[in-house]
Amino acid sequence: MSERAWAEVVGRVLHGRTQQPRQSGITMVIDKGHGLAMTNDLLEMSGDVIDHWKCTFGTSAFVPADVLRRKLLQLTARGILTYPGGTLLEVAIVYGNCRTFMQHAHTLGFSAVEISDGTIPLPRHRRRNLIRCAIDHGLIPITEVGKKDPTQQPTAEELADQALQDIEWGAQWVTVEARESGKGIGIYDDHGIVKTEAVIEFSARMGASIDRLIWEAPLKNQQTYLIQQFGMNVSLGNIAPAEVLALEALRAGLRFETFSTIAEELERLGQWNPDLIEETFPEHLSIPLSQSHDKGGVQW
């Protein structure tokens, strides 16, 4: 990775951020149809902060196969995990083409698959078999927990239990459903506000496996809450391509929502004085708020 543009000024705030290939701190992009040129431009600007790339729901079914293969090669060359949306697999399951789907995903150049039951019922034995089938076809299984219908929402306890079971069966990561809107689904209420009690219950039940979750968080207030709750290296998904760098700034404390907390804490600790005129950059300045996840602290 080449030197960042402002490394000499704000390089310290980037300390603590996991580096690619990441196991935590994942940023998953939701792609509704980026072309080759747009994808290349995005990778040139922010490829080092993108980890997963999901061709959401059934959009990739409409892309010419040769174009899709070239696009996936672009992404794979940057070490980015690629997968089609889980709804496409659900369609294949309904039409009895599950194994064909897995083989075709591998042939096209996808490196992973999302296994979900957001729309259809999926018995436990079938969910387990799908994870195994993905592995058998050389694909990384990423499962998703939750339902897309706002009237059929599982409890936080049920979501966590399914996530833990998926991990035991071989899922590499588990995505927490929120759809594109981030409203009325999973851990969010009808206005997109985080249901704090649900997150606390969910995370407590996950225990040490909490870092295996990718929280779908399309809205800034959701991203802010989860970063403040779990630290800069929380894994977040359903991020619009145009918002990737904005999210990274939020993670690092380079936006109001997270920087305000840092500035207040530095002043409280006496490490920054608003009235002091600096002659040189203070060597003693360090980023605080390094409490553990167990205490719900922020890590910057």
Image (cartoon, rainbow, N blue to C red):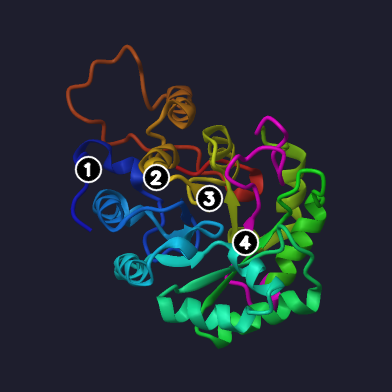
- For the point 23% across and 58% down, which residue is it? 1
Mark 2 is on which residue type? Val
- 115, above or below 118, in the image: below
Q: Under tag 1, what secondary structure?
A: helix
Mark 1 is on which residue type? Ala
Magenta span of residues? 167-192
Q: Position of residue 84 (x, y in %)?
A: 51, 65
- 209, above or below 106, in the image: above
Instruction: Looking at the picture, tell me which residue is in the foreground, 194 or 4.
Output: 194
* Marks 3 and 2, the one that precedes in the sequence: 3
Q: Under tag 2, what secondary structure?
A: helix
* Rendered-image quadrant of the C terminus: top left
Residue 244's tag is: 2
Q: Nearer the viewer, mark 4 or mark 1?
A: 4
Q: Position of residue 197 (x, y in %)?
A: 77, 40
Residue labelled with disc 4? 87
Residue 236's tag is: 3
- For the point 50% across and 38% down, which residue is it? 289
Residue labelled with disc 1? 7
Q: Nearer the viewer, mark 4 or mark 3?
A: 4
